Every structure is written in structure tokens, then in C-alpha cells.
């Protein structure tokens, strides 16, 4: 019996499944194509001495090599870490075999690959080396809008790639921040993850705590109260003489104007301040009134305008096609 043992480079060497260790200890020979395989020290510590062999890399010759090496007793082929077995290899085996996953990645483990790639790019790519938080701003916005585009278009296949592009920006900014000392505001991607995890747990006491809710509205109400307490805590810890905390604190004024208007109105509503929907003295005031009307109707003004813009674009294209066919 030939066992093809697969393992993940993202799992610490030696953390193999019980089935994997059983196969290794029961094998008459354990074959490996490189003396630098990360699992070798762990195997040797456990009393398993792999044999380094000069095995072909291609599926066809490798299948022939493994078939001839199987012999009479059980043999384990320790595949290179992270490799996926080529179906051509399995089709070419002339002996009984099994493919055994010796270690499994936890969900999210592949993000470790991104950390490593980002570190390499920051050091080895001339363009990546020169980037700063400021120089990357345009790309952060562009990638976010491209992800929005795929969602609006219903292109879920493209969304997979666009979300990755947005994620890359987060990894890039964290990598740049990691170059600063902690006392100068530096942080790592792990700090980002820790901060986000703590915030999610803190803001979901109905999931991770003892708070009971009966609807999404209850969740939203709790969310707002928690955020209010967080702002008060930040204000208490700020330097003496700082401005009095405002309900508008943390509103990003760099966002699109309609989104900004809607968020400002939502925050103002928490303070009991409403925006009139009529009696505007300027176009800007009139737009603020339209935003208020949209919010009263439970609509997002940004999405409503985007939908109207798409309808307008479709209308323009239809007229262009009609004019072209009439010529």
C-alpha cells in the first residue's frame, strides 16, 4: 500500500492527524524528495527516519517511480508541503494507494500567505517600497468602488477578485504602519485583527454576552448605545482642554457628498436635531432636504442616486442604439 501524505505549510511541523502518524509509524519506508522538508525534524524526533530519494517532479515519471518503490510493505510518500496531487499522478499509479491529508488549514489560514507576500513586495518591489498611506489613498477608494460595481452588477464571480483587491489595501497599509515604532503609532496586521475582533465581540453582546434581543431593531439600538459609550470613553481619555465630544465625531468627511449628508443627518438625529425637508435657500440645502426625505422613507440617498444614474445611462445607450439603427 502506498500512502501519499499531504501537509500544509501553514500548520506547525509535527501537528499531524492521528491517521497520518499511524501511517508513518506503520510504514516500512517513508520517502521524501528533499532533505529540507519541514516535517523531517518532527518525524525524526518521533522515531521516524525518512529516506531522501531523487524522485522525478513530473506526474508521469513520479507515478512510475512511486509504483516501483512501493515494494511489499506499506510505503509513505511525503509530498512537498502545500502541493495538490495531480490527477495524472493518481491515474499513473499501478499499486494500491491512498491520499491522506496529514494536516488541515483552519478557515482563514491562507491569509498568512498574503502576509508573507506583502512583506516580500514591500522589500523587493521598487514601486511598493515607495508607497505611503497617502499615496495609496486613491487605490483604497478605487478598489472599494470596483467592489461596489460588481455587487450592483450582480457579478459574484468578479466580486471574489474585487474583495481581494480591497483586502490587499488593508494588508498594504498595515505593512507600512508596522515600519513605525509602537510609540509613534505603529501597528501590525495582527494588531488590526485584534482591534477588530475586540470591537466585534464588544458590539455583539447578544451573541458573545448575556444580552437578549428579539429583532434586528433591538440589535441596532444596542449597537448605537455601545458606540455612544465608546465615544464617551474616548472623550474621557482625551487630553485636557480638548473640544467637547460631538455626535459628529468620527464622521469621515472624505466620503461622497450624499453619503456624508446622510451620515451627518443620522448622527444629528441622535442629538434630537432634524433637517427640514423644504424651504431651501440654495441647491445644497435642497439636496440636504432630499436626503432627509429619502431617510424618512427608509431609503439610502447614495444608492437611490446611483440607481437613477444607472437608469439614465441605460436610457442614453438605448437612444444611441436607436439613433445608430436609424442611420
Image: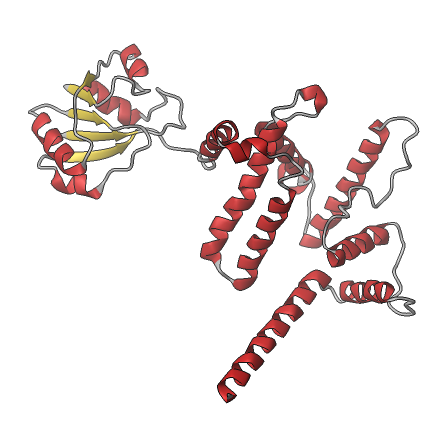
Is residue 207 placed above or below 182 in the rendered structure? below
User: Residue at coordinates 26% horizontally, 32% vertically from top-left?
Assistant: 100
Relative to the observer, which residue lies in front, 79 or 123?
123
Is residue 255 placed above or below 11 in the rendered structure? below
User: Residue at coordinates 51% horizontally, 32% vertically from top-left?
Assistant: 126
Is residue 236 placed above or below 225 in the rendered structure? above
In the image, taking residue 105 as reference, residue 3 lies left or right, namely: left
Relative to the observer, which residue lies in front, 247 or 186?
186
Q: Is any part of residue 305 visible from this angle? A: yes
Q: Is any part of residue 193 visible from this angle? A: no
Residue 84: % across, % down:
28, 37
Q: In which quarter of the image is the N terminus?
A: top left
> How many numbered marks have been drawn onto this rendered protein structure?
0
- Give the colouring mode of the picture: secondary structure
In the image, taking residue 249 as reference, residue 8 lies left or right, namely: left
In the image, taking residue 62 as reference, residue 145 lies left or right, namely: right
Residue 193: % across, % down:
59, 32
Residue 25, by quadrant, is top left
Residue found farthest to the bottom = 326
Residue 127: % across, % down:
53, 35
Relative to the observer, which residue lies in front, 201 or 138?
138
Residue 5: % across, % down:
25, 29
In the image, taking residue 170 as reference, residue 5 lies left or right, namely: left
Amino acid at each position: 500500500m502506498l500512502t501519499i501524505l499531504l501537509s500544509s505549510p501553514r500548520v506547525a511541523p509535527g501537528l499531524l492527524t492521528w491517521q497520518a502518524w499511524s501511517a508513518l509509524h506503520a510504514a516500512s519506508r517513508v520517502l521524501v524528495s528533499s532533505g529540507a522538508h519541514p516535517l523531517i525534524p518532527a518525524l525524526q524526533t518521533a522515531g521516524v527516519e525518512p529516506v531522501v530519494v531523487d524522485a522525478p517532479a513530473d506526474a508521469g515519471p513520479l507515478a512510475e517511480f512511486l509504483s516501483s518503490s512501493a515494494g511489499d510493505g506499506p510505503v509513505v510518500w511525503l509530498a512537498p508541503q502545500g502541493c495538490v496531487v495531480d490527477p495524472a499522478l493518481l491515474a499513473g499509479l499501478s499499486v494500491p494507494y491512498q491520499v491522506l491529508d496529514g494536516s488541515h488549514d483552519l478557515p482563514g489560514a491562507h491569509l498568512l500567505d498574503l502576509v508573507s507576500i506583502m512583506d516580500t513586495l514591500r522589500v523587493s518591489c521598487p514601486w511598493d517600497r515607495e508607497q505611503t498611506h497617502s499615496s495609496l489613498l486613491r487605490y483604497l477608494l478605487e478598489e472599494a468602488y470596483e467592489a461596489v460595481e460588481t455587487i450592483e452588477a450582480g457579478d459574484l464571480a468578479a466580486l471574489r477578485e474585487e474583495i481581494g483587491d480591497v483586502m490587499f489595501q488593508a494588508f498594504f497599509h498595515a505593512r507600512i504602519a508596522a515600519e513605525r515604532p509602537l510609540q509613534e503609532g505603529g501597528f501590525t496586521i495582527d494588531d488590526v485583527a485584534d482591534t477588530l475582533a475586540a470591537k466585534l465581540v464588544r458590539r455583539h453582546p447578544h451573541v458573545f454576552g448575556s444580552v437578549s434581543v428579539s429583532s434586528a431593531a433591538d440589535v441596532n439600538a444596542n449597537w448605537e448605545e455601545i458606540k455612544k459609550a465608546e465615544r464617551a470613553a474616548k472623550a474621557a481619555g482625551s487630553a485636557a482642554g480638548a473640544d467637547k465630544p460631538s455626535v459628529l465625531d468620527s464622521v469621515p468627511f472624505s466620503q461622497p457628498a450624499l453619503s456624508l449628508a446622510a451620515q451627518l443627518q443620522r448622527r444629528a438625529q441622535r442629538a434630537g436635531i432634524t433637517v427640514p425637508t423644504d424651504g431651501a435657500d440654495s441647491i445644497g440645502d435642497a439636496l440636504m432636504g432630499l436626503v432627509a426625505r429619502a431617510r424618512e422613507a427608509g431609503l439610502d440617498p447614495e444608492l437611490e442616486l446611483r440607481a437613477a444614474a444607472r437608469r439614465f445611462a441605460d436610457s442614453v445607450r438605448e437612444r444611441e442604439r436607436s439613433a445608430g439603427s436609424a442611420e
